[in-house]
Amino acid sequence: MQVDLNGVINHKYKQFNAKKEGHILLKGRSLIDPSDFTRDEFREIFDLAHQIVENPESYRKSCNGKILATLFYEPSTRTRFSFEAAMLRLGGQVIGFSEPNSSSAAKGESIADTIRTIECYADIAVMRHPKEGAPKVASQYISMPLINAGDGGHQHPTQTLTDILTIERLKGNVENKVYGFCGDLKFGRTVHSLIKFLSNYKGVRFILISPEELRVPEYIREEVIKKSGIPFEEVIEMEPYMGQLDFLYMTRVQRERFFNEEDYIRLKDRFILDADKMKYAKKETYILHPLPRVNEISTDVDADPRAQYFVQAKNGMYVRMALILKLLGIY
Ligand code: NCD
């Protein structure tokens, strides 16, 4: 008997991607890494997100009776609040913890047991964890969708959704653009996820601005950027490159991931964007930042119309509304 492996794989693929009124269904899927979804699948999420931005009111009962669980083992403001606000604005409800010591993790419960328990109560869950790979492991124990809200210095795919929605709203699409990334490119997980996502698009170029010690990890440089053939430069100054950029993505130096405080103190103020430096940028060079900022963007930049980081934070809620709707199979 011949086993038609393609048939099996295709069958599985079709099950996952069954079409509903011309849409790709993402029901039951988890989002752990930007490579978990295809370009078409991401397109579905962004198209829905744009519709929600235009008309949020019409979605306010879409998640009636559904529960989102938020498991935050690391501090968060925007990611947790935007997920919670997203679910509440969809008419659903939220349970969870933002302080792991208030959960049974403090008693030594494993992530596997915690997530299996949460699955008894919720329809979808969001997890942030200091250990790289923790959300992936957790997702293997459950069948409800799990969203990675940041795992250590590794990935943060929903910040990428936020960033891409913002880029599309400002410039229409992500292609044929020069992206500057500045700051802690080594530990900054939002940078890793955004680079991974953008590397699938044509005409993209990266300028990676960081101190020598905080360059992107080797797996991002070799396995993602070089493999996709994306032109890139690694540089140690900001001003000479500002005039080339369509977007400048600033990041804070990730103090909590440093091995020693001296290195942090030595590197933390290496790049500070201020109103003076903005003079080197083009009229339409937009400044993004996942936030929180420490002092890498001076507050005198905030009133510049090119500063888009608070708009970006708002877009984070809309795109998470779209993600929740898609993973629950409501849209
Ligand atoms: C980022 C994170 O947690 O990785 N914050 C966020 O989710 N918006 C960036 C950071 O902490 O520097």
Image: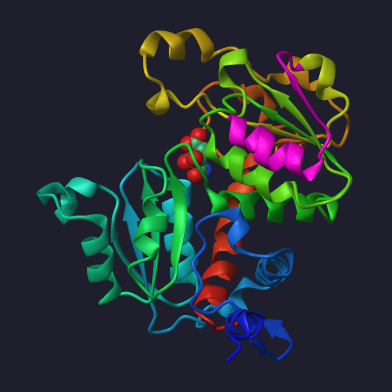
Left or right side of 228 for 288: left
State whether residue 293 is above or below residue 51: above
Task: Let me know if residue 311 appears in the view.
Answer: no
In the image, residue 101 lies at what x, y percent?
18, 46
Specify the color scheme: rainbow
Asked whether residue 167 is drawn in magenta, I would say no
Task: Let me know if residue 143 appears in the view.
Answer: yes
Quadrant in which the C terminus appears: bottom right
In the image, residue 223 lies at what x, y percent?
66, 40
| Residue at horizontal 36 percent and vertical 51 percent from the top | 134
In the image, residue 248 lies at what x, y percent?
74, 32
State whether residue 144 is above or below residue 64: above
- Give the extent of the magenta segment: 217-238
State whether residue 232 is above or below residue 49: above
Residue 261 or residue 48, whichever sits in front: 261
| Residue at horizontal 66 percent and vertical 89 percent from the top | 20
Q: Residue furthest front?
A: 1
Left or right side of 207 for 121: left
| Residue at horizontal 60 percent and vertical 55 percent from the top | 34
| Residue at horizontal 62 percent and vertical 15 percent from the top | 211
Asked whether residue 227 is drawn in magenta, I would say yes
Residue 257 or residue 250, whichever sits in front: 257
